[in-house]
Image: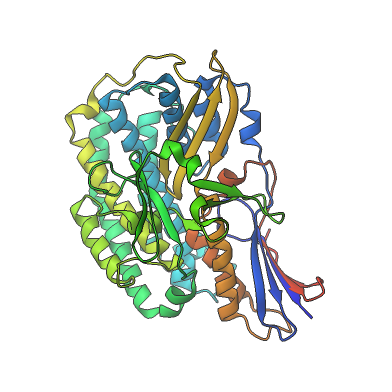
C-alpha cells in the first residue's frame, strides 16, 4: 500500500503551492512532487497591447521582483527599437537592479528562511516566523529589515516608488538620478555592509554545524546556467552572455547570445503543475535539468569582480567539490548573502561614477524589428522576455521564461531527497518539524510562484500523504 502526505500550503514563500509525498507499504518515501496550482495568464492577455505599455504591465507580474520584469521588458523594447541606450541609462538600470537584488535577497534570507536557522526547524510554528525572530533575536531581525529597506530606497529614489516603478522604458529610463538622492544612498551604505557581513559570519558558522542539511537539502549534480560579463566571464546581473556549466565545472555553453535562448532551452509541461520545466535541449528532458539564481551565478562566473565578494567567493568554492562547484541547494542562502555583498560594492562604485548624474538617459527610436528578446538576471535567476510585434508595435506573441520555472526540476528533486532522508516508517503521520524541513528545501530556492505561472488564483501551501492505492491518509495545511 502506497500512502500520500500533502503539505498545503507551503509557507514563507512568494505565491502558493503544495507538496505531495508518496509512501510505500513500509512508510518509506517512494516519490515526492512540488505542485504549483495558481495560474495568471500574463502571456495571453498582453497580446494586443502596445509595446510601450509592456514594461509597466509585466512589472505587475509580481510585487516582490517587479524591477526584474521592468528591466527585461525594457530590454526587449530596446531590441525591437534596435537602439543602443545612453551609457548613463544603462548604469542607472544596473543601479536599480542591484537595489532589487539587495531587497529581494534580504527578504528571502532574513524574513523567510532565517526563522528556521535561528529558531530551529522543530520550533513552535506559531513563533517560527519574522515576529518570533524579532522577539528572540531583535538585532538580527532589525538588521535584515533595514537592509531590505535600503534596497527598496534605491528603487524608490530612481523610479519614484518601491513597487512597480514606471521608470525603465524602451530606449533607456524616464528620469536621471539627482545629486541629493545619490548622496543619501551613499550615507546608507556603511550600515548595509555591516549587516550583510555579520549575516555571512553567522551563516558560515551555521553551515559548519549543520552538515546534515547541507548534504541533503537538494544536493545532487545538475547543470548551472546564467549570464556572465562579455569580458572575462565575471558575475553579471543585467547584461552579458549566457554560460552553462555542469557539476564538474565543464563549460558546455559560453559566449552565447541569450536572445537565441530558444535554440538551446526547451520547456516541458507536467499534468500535476502549472509550472513549466525548462531544460537544456542537447541533453533532453529531464536529463537537461539546470539550476539558475545565486547558486548558479556563483558556480558559473570566473569571479565576482569586487574585492570583498571575491574573497567570499573563494571561501564559498572551498566548500564545493574538487572543481569548486557547490551542488547543495542549501547553499543558495550562502550565495544570496555573497550576492548582496557584491551588489553593495557595485552600488558604491556606480554612485561614484561621473555618468550616474547625466541627464542623457534615453534614446529615441521606432519599430525597426518585429521580434525582440530582453534577458536579465532577476534575484532568483535568468529572466527571458520574448516579444513579437506587428508594424504598429502591437504585441502579437509573448513568451516569459521565469527563474523559478527553470529551477522546477531541481525543486522537485530536492523535495524528494529531503523526504527520503528524514521521513521513515511514517505509518501514523509525520511530525510537523519534518514537514517543515521539506518546505525549507523549497524556501532555499526562494521561488516566486506568481512570476512563474502566469494564472489568477490563490494557493496556500499544502503537504499531502498518499498511500499506494492513491488514498490521502494525512494532510498538513497552512492557510
Q: In terms of depth relative to the viewer, which is nearer, 105 or 374? A: 374
> Quick check: can you spot residue 187?
no
Q: Position of residue 69 (x, y in %)?
A: 48, 36
Q: How is the image coloured?
A: rainbow
> Which of these two is toward me, 95 or 272?
272
Relative to 471, say whether 429 is above or below.
below
Q: Position of residue 454 (x, y in %)?
A: 62, 41
- On screen, residue 155 above or below 335: above
Which of the 4 image quarters holds residue 423? Answer: bottom right
| Placement of 14 over or under 261, stated as above or below | below
Q: Position of residue 162 (x, y in %)?
A: 44, 36
All told, the count of numbered labels is 0
Quadrant (top left, top right, bottom left, bottom right) of the N terminus: bottom right
Q: State the image quarter where residue 438 is shown.
A: bottom right
Please tell me which residue is depicted at 42% across the width and 26% down the height of the picture: 79
Q: Which image quadrant: the C terminus?
A: bottom right
Residue at 75% x, 76% y: name it: 3
- Residue at 34% from the left image edge and 33% from the top image edge: 93
Q: Nearer the viewer, residue 414 or 121?
A: 414
Query: Residue 238 location, x and y as percent?
Result: 35, 39
Which residue shows up at 50% across the image and 25% down it?
Answer: 371
Amino acid at each position: 500500500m502506497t500512502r500520500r502526505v500533502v503539505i498545503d500550503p507551503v509557507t514563507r514563500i512568494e505565491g502558493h503551492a503544495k507538496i505531495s509525498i508518496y509512501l510505500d507499504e513500509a512508510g518509506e518515501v517512494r516519490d515526492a512532487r512540488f505542485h504549483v496550482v495558481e495560474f495568471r495568464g500574463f502571456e495571453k492577455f498582453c497580446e494586443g497591447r502596445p509595446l510601450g505599455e509592456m514594461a509597466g504591465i509585466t512589472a505587475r507580474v509580481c510585487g516582490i521582483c517587479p524591477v526584474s520584469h521592468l528591466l527585461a521588458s525594457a530590454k526587449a523594447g530596446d531590441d525591437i527599437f534596435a537602439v543602443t541606450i545612453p551609457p548613463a541609462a544603462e548604469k542607472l538600470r544596473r543601479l536599480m537592479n542591484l537595489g532589487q537584488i539587495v531587497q529581494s535577497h534580504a527578504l528571502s534570507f532574513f524574513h523567510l528562511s532565517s526563522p528556521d536557522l535561528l529558531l530551529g526547524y522543530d520550533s513552535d510554528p506559531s513563533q517560527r516566523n519574522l515576529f518570533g525572530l524579532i522577539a528572540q533575536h531583535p538585532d538580527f531581525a532589525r538588521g535584515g529589515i533595514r537592509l531590505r529597506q535600503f534596497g527598496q530606497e534605491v528603487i524608490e529614489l530612481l523610479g519614484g516608488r518601491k513597487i512597480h516603478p514606471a521608470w525603465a522604458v524602451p530606449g533607456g529610463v524616464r528620469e536621471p538620478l539627482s545629486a541629493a538622492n545619490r548622496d543619501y544612498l551613499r550615507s546608507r551604505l556603511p550600515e548595509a555592509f555591516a549587516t550583510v557581513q555579520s549575516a555571512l559570519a553567522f551563516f558560515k558558522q551555521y553551515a559548519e554545524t549543520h552538515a546534515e542539511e547541507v548534504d541533503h537539502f537538494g544536493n545532487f549534480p545538475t547543470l548551472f546556467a546564467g549570464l556572465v560579463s562579455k569580458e572575462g566571464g565575471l558575475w553579471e546581473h543585467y547584461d552579458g552572455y549566457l554560460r552553462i556549466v555542469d557539476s564538474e565545472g565543464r563549460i558546455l555553453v559560453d559566449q552565447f547570445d541569450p536572445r537565441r535562448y530558444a535554440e538551446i532551452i526547451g520547456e516541458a509541461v507536467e499534468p500535476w503543475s502549472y509550472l513549466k520545466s525548462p531544460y537544456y535541449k542537447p541533453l533532453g528532458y529531464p536529463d537537461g535539468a539546470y539550476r539558475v539564481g545565486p547558486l548558479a551565478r556563483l558556480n558559473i562566473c570566473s569571479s565576482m569582480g569586487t574585492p570583498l565578494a571575491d574573497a567570499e567567493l573563494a571561501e564559498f568554492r572551498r566548500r564545493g567539490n574538487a572543481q569548486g562547484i557547490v551542488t547543495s541547494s542549501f547553499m543558495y542562502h550562502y550565495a544570496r548573502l555573497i550576492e548582496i555583498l557584491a551588489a553593495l560594492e557595485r552600488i558604491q562604485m556606480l554612485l561614484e561614477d561621473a555618468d550616474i548624474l547625466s541627464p542623457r538617459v534615453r534614446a529615441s527610436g521606432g519599430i525597426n524589428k518585429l521580434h525582440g528578446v530582453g534577458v536579465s538576471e532577476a534575484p532568483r535567476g535568468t529572466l527571458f522576455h520574448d516579444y513579437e510585434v506587428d508594424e504598429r508595435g502591437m504585441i502579437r506573441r509573448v513568451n516569459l521564461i521565469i527563474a523559478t520555472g527553470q529551477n522546477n526540476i531541481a525543486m522537485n528533486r530536492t523535495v524528494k531527497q529531503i523526504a527520503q532522508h528524514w521521513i521513515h516508517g511514517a505509518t501514523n503521520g509525520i511530525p510537523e518539524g519534518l514537514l517543515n524541513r521539506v518546505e525549507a528545501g523549497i524556501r532555499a530556492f526562494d521561488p516566486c510562484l506568481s512570476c512563474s505561472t502566469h494564472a489568477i488564483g490563490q494557493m496556500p501551501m499544502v503537504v499531502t500523504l498518499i498511500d499506494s492505492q492513491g488514498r490521502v491518509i494525512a494532510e498538513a495545511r497552512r492557510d
